[in-house]
Image: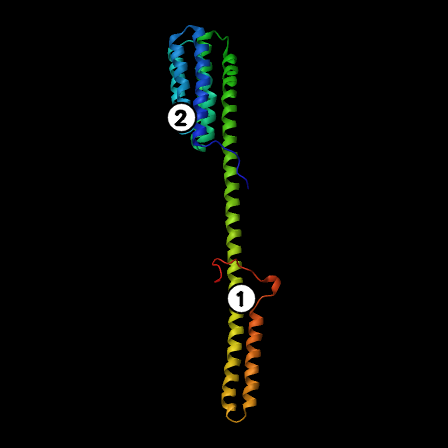
Amino acid sequence: MRPPRRLGPTGRRVFDVVLVLLLGPLVLWLSLGTGSIPGTALSVAMVLPLLARRRHPGAVVLAVAALCLLQVVVLDQPVAGQVVVPVALYSLARYAGPVPAGAGLALAAVGATLAAYDWRARGGFEDTGDVVRSALAIGSVALTAWVLGALGRTRSSYVDALLERGDRIERDAVQRVALAASDERARIAREMHDVVAHALSVVVVQADGARYAAAQDPRVATDALERIAGTGRGAGARLTPPRGDRVVCPRTVPPPS
């Protein structure tokens, strides 16, 4: 199985730096429009932790959550830097385990409720229904980011499992081929051993008979020698593969002149 294209360590770092460089000026520009110096400082501080969103997603979410809580205590209105909250939640669900991701989702729900209540108290919402609707709107954005991150983590795990299974199947196939080749070599060696042993036993018997018969009748010795030669040629023919199957190895040393 061909592995999917993924960013390497350098590519991931560059992507995170570019993300911060894009969000930073945007958040700064939106914050300067409000004229709030504390809001601008909080917005910039919320963007910077995204540089570590892959290596330490839990710490990034905690840092952003602490800054959001500080905004609730210090300021009367939300700040532009809170647009990084969905990015932090996505990173937590994507790069952390199920337990930290679930804790982050619960924290997001609490934060959405707290933010909606704070904006109601300071922004003039008319009734409790406004708080509920605001909390649902904020929570839906956070939930969407979290679900996208969880789906990305699940897909990555599934692809990694498929790649590992493909590698295991390939290793097993190579091992089976090696075992089959070893068995074939052992079979050929056994056959060659049987052929050579049989031929040698015949040669020894014929040679002994020729040696004893040579003193009485030289013709018997001649016939025995012919049978010995025939036995050797027959054994050689059985050990030699057919011409079409013969493997010709290239010479590595030039023949003598």
Farthest-out residue, right: 244
- Frontmost residue, 205 versus 250: 250
Which is nearer the N-term, disc 2 or disc 1?
A: 2
Task: Name the amino acid type tagged 1.
Answer: Ile
Picture coordinates of residue 96, whole percent (x, y): 43, 31
- Frontmost residue, 81 versus 8: 8
Say what secondary structure mark 1 lies in: helix
Q: Which mark is residue 188?
A: 1
* Image quarter in which the N terminus is found: top right
Tally the marks.
2
Q: Is residue 103 left or right of residue 133?
A: left
Near mark 1 (Cα within 10 A), the count class, few <14, some 14-19 or many ≥20, is: few
Q: Which mark is residue 52?
A: 2
Task: Name the amino acid type tagged 2.
Answer: Ala
Rounded to the nearest angstrom, the CA distance separating label 2 from label 1 is 62 Å
Picture coordinates of residue 63, whole percent (x, y): 38, 22
Picture coordinates of residue 182, whole percent (x, y): 50, 60
- Frontmost residue, 89 versus 235: 235
Picture coordinates of residue 129, whole percent (x, y): 52, 13
Q: Quadrant of residue 75?
A: top left
Task: Write the residue at 37% across / 11% down.
Answer: 74
